[in-house]
Image (cartoon, coloured by chain):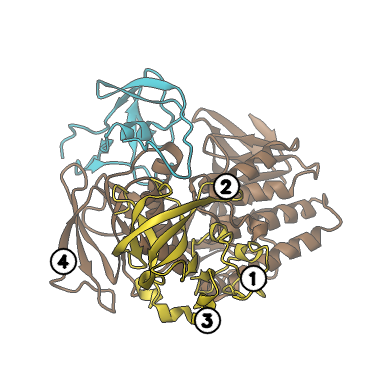
Chain colours: A cyan, B yellow, C brown
Amino acid sequence: MRIKEHPIIDYQKGKTVTFTFDGVPYEGFDDEPIAVALYANGIKTLSYSLKYHRPRGIFCCIGNCSSCLMKVNGIPNVRTCTQRIEQGMVIETQGKGVKK
Amino acid sequence: MFIKNGYLDIDELGERMPSEERFERGPVAILECIQQIPCNPCQDACSRGAILPFQSINDTPTIDMDKCNGCGNCISACPGLAIFVVWKNYNLESSLIKLPLELLPFPEEGDSVELMNRKGEKVGIGKVIKIQKTKQNPKSRVIWVEVPKKLAMEVRHISRSNNHDK
Amino acid sequence: MRIDCDVLIIGGGPAGLCAARSLLGTGLNVLILERDPFLGGQLLKQTHMFFGSKEQYAGTRGFEIGQILTREVQASPNVTVMLETVASGYYPEENFILALEKEKKLYQIYFKKVIVATGASEKSLLFEGNDLPGIYGAGAVQTLMNMYGVMPGQDIIMIGSGNIGLIVSYQLLQAGVKVKAILEAAPTVGGYFVHAAKVRRMGIPIFTQTTVKRALGQNALEAVEIVNLDSKWQYVAGTERKWSCDTLCLAVGLSPMSELLWQFQCEMRYVSELGGYVAKRNAIMQTTHPDVYIAGDVSGVEEASSAMLEGTIAGFAAAKALHKMLDSVDQVIQNSQKFLDEMHRGPIGEKIRNGLAKVEVDVCL
């Protein structure tokens, strides 16, 4: 969900782009990171841990931890909290369906 | 105790509490800044020199209540939003409080608002008299709110009923 | 590709920007590496007016300070900025920093002096279920709402009543998010009283000697179990209760991001008052490696005003070491040192003073 009005900040938004997440199309802004665009669309679970298959979301959102790694345009382990979203990007949950 | 609860008890104000005699004379600023922290922008905020110069940046502010005319210009200069102006005898029944606000929706003049005390409890209903904006800090507002006289030293925040800060 | 510079600044936050500002007009070739696509670091997420003194922009909102410093530095002909570039390692054999630009291009960066201003990373907290989506560092919440205008959640519980926990709670209210409570493990509120007073009067309760024991939820956070703590920081049996919430925000401190300083083989020490391992340094922010200076949270976690002063000192010190100095350089350094000492002098500065006493050394050079 996006903040509509803020007492202090005037948000500057970039260009609207379309991307897919696990095959479903969504919209975001081209100046925001992938994980942020997903979050704005209500998507919190970005990957599953390899060993115990636990859901993972963002944690630090500035590229320090590795909680937000996803598959982007076929490339795994992309740090989606810092990588900008682009028109036509194919984003996929990482580790989905991995069995213990 | 402020350190335990996050809000002050009125006797913790100490010398910052104006005398009844001073209240009689009209509006006065109350600096609810009772902990030594490295911060000093208020000392330059008063054109009348009522907020005395700091010896050290860790001083708590001292106000000369004879120089203060309760104009409220210092309110939006305080990063801690800790300055309030109280005009106890605004009229026979009510006091006027000037307080800082940086939350949406901003009230309009004439609005009826809920009055909150330092603990965030609703203690009554008041009326917005004026919205004061300053050049140096256009994003925050100083709200003039009329409150029942007995709440003059209680009310420190207002809330519109559809406000999100419930 | 090889790049040569006189002074390399790693990190374009408040410390790095102030270091660069000290080097304006020196004729030295200055390079800033910043991993984000913009300068300003964490300043850009701060919507509140800063404390401190007006020389460090007190009374100005954090993001505006970031914009002011960015403009000053970008307007300077002797400063080059590489954005989206990570300093990924130091190679002592050849004495260069390896930098990776946009995850694609590698650079070997040779320098005469380096100012490490890499900042800090947020700590987590140990409890069952702490990896569920919906549990974030306070910085992440600030990034979502203040940088990108995205609601971090609807119903939030904050852990930690230090300045970050209090300020972020206030910022959440400004963004229209409900903050259910602030939990503090210690018996007293950790941050400045005025920050606490602000959120209290807006109706957010602060529960001291209380913490989170367990996070509950299937695919994301749905509730937390909270518990009281006794004077020995142990759970009080029978006080557990379940609160629903969709977001848990952890504001439990930061640790310096000192990896590069280890690689430089600076003498390091663990100082809990400063957040973790920090490099020993002298009064001009020079480490035990004579070419390496530090500034900001990497030199010890503190307020941004201190970071700005440390950056200013480190920048001037590097200029002086390279014999590119104003006549008044010693005076300017001393002035900043005086401000910094003055800030640390009060009761709030006690912890920092104790921490600094463990890492400040006389000799370096």
Q: Chain of mark 3?
A: B
Say which element carries label 4: loop
x 27%, y 34%: residue = A43
Q: CA distance from mark 3 to mark 1?
A: 18 Å
Element at badge 3? helix
Q: Vertically, is C347 above or below C31?
A: below
- Check the picture and name the quadrant holding the N terminus of chain C: top right
SS class, disc 1:
loop
Q: Amino acid at mark 3?
A: Glu
Q: Residue furthest right?
A: C327
Q: Badge 2 is on which residue?
A: C13
Residue type indicated by callout 2: Gly
Residue B50 is marked as: 1
In the foreground, C204 or B164: B164
**Residue denoted by label 4:** C240
Query: Do callouts 2 and 3 mark residues in contact (Cβ within 8 Å)?
Result: no
Instruction: Choose mark 4 or mark 3, whichever is in front.
Output: 3
- Report how far apart the C-alphas of labels 2 and 4 lie in the structure: 41 Å
Graded by Cα atoms within 10 Å as few (under 14), some (14 to 19) or many (20 or more), the crowding at tag 3 reads few
The percent position of residue A72, horizontal first and vertical second, equals 35, 26
Q: Chain of mark 1?
A: B
Rendered image quadrant of residue C234: bottom left
| Residue B32, position as x, y percentages in the image | 48, 71
In screen coordinates, is C21 left or right of B128?
A: right
Asked whether C244 or B9 is in front, the reply is B9
**Percent position of residue C271, x then y:** 49, 68
Name the chain under label 2: C
Whether callout 4 and callout 1 share a subunit is answered no
Which of pointers 4 and 1 indicates the residue nearer the eye?
Answer: 1
Q: Residue under mark 4: which chain is it in?
A: C
Residue ID for mark 3: B21
